[in-house]
Image (cartoon, rainbow, N blue to C red):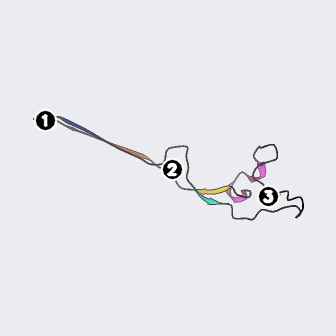
Amino acid sequence: MTNAVQVNCVVGLGAGNPLATGCSTSNGIYNNPTSMTLTNNQYNADGSLNQSRLTPRTAGFGAANGALPMRNIQLELRLEF
């Protein structure tokens, strides 16, 4: 008689790492053609997030605005005696 242990693990996309599926399709909006200052920016000049562009509906130029649902982990354990 033989004893056996079998472990199967299927891991999808790990928690905290969403897969972006969309990008803001609005074109960059500039204040004038010579200075090229972006007015629908996602980030402020100091690198902080633009507080008026935090939701996907109001996302700034080039921001992710869609993601796939989070994945799960499936674990299977088989024992034979």
> How busy is the neighbourhood of tag 2: few (under 14 within 10 Å), some, or many (20 plus)?
few
Q: Residues within 10 Å of mark 1 (few under 14, many from 20)?
A: few
Tag 3: amino acid: Asn
> Which residue is labeled 2 in the image?
70
Percent of width and height locating residue 23: 65, 60
User: Is residue 2 on the magenta stretch?
Assistant: no
User: What percent of the width, then of the height, locates residue 80?
Assistant: 18, 38
Quick one: SS at disc 1? loop
Mark 1 vs 3, N-terminal side: 1
Q: Is residue 51 left or right of residue 73?
A: right
Residue 2 image label: 1
Residue flagged by tag 1: what amino acid is it? Thr
- Cα–Cα gap, marks 3 and 2: 29 Å
Quadrant of residue 4 within the rendered picture:
top left
Q: Which residues are magenta?
A: 41-60
Residue at 88 percent of width and 64 percent of height: 33
Mark 3 surroundings: few (<14), some (14-19) or many (≥20) residues within 10 A: many
Q: Quadrant of the N terminus?
A: top left
User: Label 3: which residue?
Assistant: 40
12 horizontally vs 51: left or right: left
Q: Which mark is residue 25?
A: none
Residue type of the residue flagged with mark 2 = Met
Of pointers 3 and 2, the one earlier in the residue sequence: 3
Element marked by disc 3: loop
- Residue 74, image quadrant: top left
Quadrant occupied by the C terminus: top left
Q: Determine the CA span between mark 1 and mark 3.
A: 67 Å
